Amino acid sequence: MYIYIEIVDVVANAFIKLLKNGEKNYVLFSELDNYGARVVEYLNCDKDIHAVYVVSQEAQHDLCVDYSRFFKEYEGENGERGIQLEDGISQMDIWEQFCAALSFKVAMAFKQVSVAG
């Protein structure tokens, strides 16, 4: 089985975890790349699954445009770029919009893998 993990899946699940833990309201692209890679690695432990993380700079930019109600671009003091959660967005808002349609295996992979390296 082939599973394609997209940046929107990674961002949504990262923010669900960050909100649950009361952490920051932004995540850097470098953190997202690492998180996505770890989720793919976790999924690929199953010999019947071939997971791939599909990401590009265009997809990163489009995420903020397509889902501007939820996310905006973030730039840290050191120039590191990422995604910031808009004010007033809850875990449930994110879950309903982005995660409800994920397969059980993918949802469990996101749940098992930490956002932080």
Image: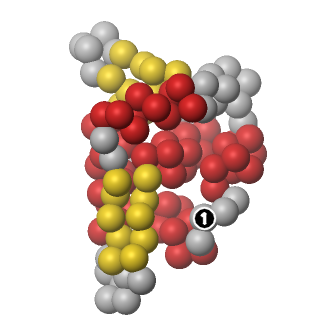
Q: Residue at x 63, y 56 (%)?
A: 99
Residue 85 falls left or right of residue 58: right
Vertical arrangement, residue 114 with respect to residue 22, above or below = below
What SS does tag 1 mark? loop
Q: Residue at x 28, y 21 (%)?
A: 80
Which residue extends farthest top? 77
Q: Residue at x 60, y 32 (%)?
A: 67
In percent of width and height, residue 44 lies at: 32, 76
Residue 43 falls left or right of residue 63: left
Image quarter of residue 5: bottom left
Q: Residue at x 75, y 45 (%)?
A: 92
In percent of width and height, residue 94 lies at: 67, 43
Q: Nearer the viewer, residue 94 or 68?
A: 68
Any part of residue 25 in sight: no
Screen quadrant of the N terminus:
bottom left
- Crowdedness near tag 1: few (<14), some (14–19) or many (≥20) residues, C-alpha within 10 Å: few
Residue 14 falls left or right of residue 91: left
In percent of width and height, residue 29 lies at: 33, 35
Which residue extends farthest bottom? 48
Q: Nearer the viewer, residue 76 or 70?
A: 70
Vertical arrangement, residue 93 with respect to residue 74, above or below = below
Residue behind mark 1: 102
Any part of residue 9 in sight: yes
Image quarter of residue 90: top right
Vertical arrangement, residue 49 with respect to residue 66, above or below = below
Q: How many marks?
A: 1
Q: How is the image coloured?
A: secondary structure
| Kind of residue sitting beneath label 1 | Leu
Q: Nearer the viewer, residue 63 or 29?
A: 63
Q: Nearer the viewer, residue 56 or 95?
A: 56
